[in-house]
Image (cartoon, helix red, strand yellow):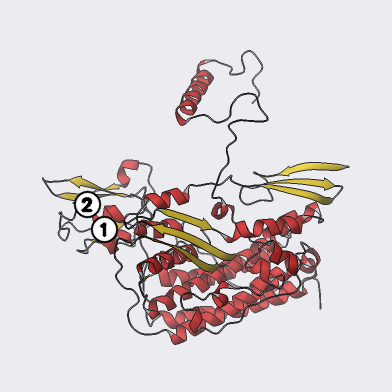
Amino acid sequence: MAVTIPIGPQHPALKEPINLTVTVDGETIVDIGVRLGYNHRGIEKAGELGNYIQDIYLTARICGICSHIHSTTFCQGVEELLGLEVPKRGLYIRTLVCELERIHSHLLWLGVAGHELGFDTLFMYSWRDREIVMDLLEIISGNRVNYGMNTIGGVRRNITDEMKPQILKGIQQLKERTEYYLGVASTEVTFLRRTEGVGLLPKEKAIELCACGPTARGSGVEYDVRRDDPYAAYPYLDFKVVTSDLGDVLGRTVVRVLEVIESCKMCRQIIEELPEGEFRTKAPRKVPAGEVVSKTEAPRGELLHYIRSNGTDHPERLKVRTPTLANITSVLHCLKGGYIADIPIVFAAIDPCMACMDRIMILDSENRNRKEKQAISWEELRKYSMKWYSDRYQSPSPLKGEARRV
Amino acid sequence: MSKIGAMFPEISRYLFKKRATVLYPFERLDIPKNFRGRPIYDPEKCSLKCKGLCATDCPAKAIIMEQVGEEESRPVFLLYRCAFCGQCAESCPFGAITLSEEFELASYDKESLISKQW
């Protein structure tokens, strides 16, 4: 007999609100539905109201973990609209922060994955080692998160010569630690039992469902924006795109851990080959009319920003497509046929970020389920709340004669 | 090759090491050079007539311009809104704003977070 259980929007297994309607037969998931939109923040509209300089900081706040890549994508789009050429040193510094951010995001994910598997030791240790990269980001930008490094026409802070040995030392430590975690992830039996063959996504299915980022690469799809549509300083760097043919959660883990090692090599190359000269150019405040799609490889996958300008100092339209939205259909496929107990880890394996993803919220004012209307105006809500509170504090019992439950 | 307790040697090694955390506020870490804290306004350098480029560019709308003369205005910093991005310091053509290293700005009183520095 099939039973339908709701998971979320508030659920201990989820870090952010999303609703999964899971139909189970015994322990096996037979069908799964998803509802998004619990975390809509109106960022696109806010972006249209602010000017381009304000929007750099706004787009950086789309995601708390991959904030730099969002502002990079935005700045890159605006620079393309302006026809502005960014100095090479600026591009290198921008790429360095991108790669450090990828290291920090993937190490954070490794900890979260360990936590979801009940392997909290891995969680504690990988997060402690993540502090190394957080310290490096703090040295470069002054902040642990929301670095504020990007500006239209380059980066805001330079890398001085005394920073270089510190960064190289940190990267070396990180590389050693990540190699150790690769060993742990591929030998520890408690880790392997929970990840091998769990959440299978075959290569054909990954292509069909438009998976992106480590989710697609963990299924053997060799696609990476950094190599296939290079931006910033990536054309000048040597790196290989990591893929795995396993197609399960273990495959995605291996891809992420190997990507960290690859990123460490890239950071080293950037520091060693950092060109001399200016790191930013002056950008005009007004952007000529036009439209642009800017594409980058965020730690979670391919990230798109669409910007339409109208000749003023603020964008006419800003549209953001985050990698989580692209991966949500493939995660539903992965969950089908699996066990209820595997939902947290399979869902976490795409590294979901709901707050980044939600671009729309659907309100059903027609209301199919209840008799009274749900959608009420702000004024009505205010009046209702004032009445509710005054009733509550004036009458001794708000439940009108019934015994008040405490 | 799979084995149980792959992290065990590592964990037992760390039993005898120093702790990784510091006892804030008794111990403090060094503040990085590029840190952005409470904005400091230099009334001498401010031109008064630029109509507030700092306020126009502030992404958090944390700066409001207050009229001080007929055509002159000075910025008021609303620290409860400030995101400490440092864009005001960058936008100011006269270098009248700098960001300090002060970061312990929590307060019970909202009024004390309105910073008028002239």
Q: Chain of mark 2?
A: B
**Residue B40 has which mark?**
1
**Disc 1 versus disc 2: distance between alpha carbons?**
8 Å
Q: Residue at x 42, y 76 (%)?
A: A91
Q: Position of residue A181 (x, y in %)?
A: 67, 74
The vertical placement of B3 against B111, above or below, is below
Q: Position of residue A238 (x, y in %)?
A: 55, 85
Which of the marked residues, 1 or 2, is nearer the chain's N terminus? 1
Q: Residue at x 27, y 52 (%)?
A: B55
The vertical placement of A178 against B53, above or below, is below
Secondary structure state at the residue bearing disc 2: loop
Direction from residue A354 to residue A86 in the image, left or right: left
Direction from residue B87 to residue B52 in the image, left or right: left
- Disc 1 marks a residue whose amino acid type is Ile
Direction from residue A258 to residue B47 in the image, left or right: left
Structural crowding at the residue carrying mark 1, measured as other residues with C-alpha within 10 Å and reported as few (<14), some (14–19) or many (≥20): some
Pointer 1 with pointer 2, Cβ within 8 A: yes
On the image, numbered disc 2 is attached to which residue? B117
Q: Position of residue A290 (x, y in %)?
A: 39, 61
Q: Residue at x 47, y 72 (%)?
A: A97
- Disc 2 marks a residue whose amino acid type is Gln
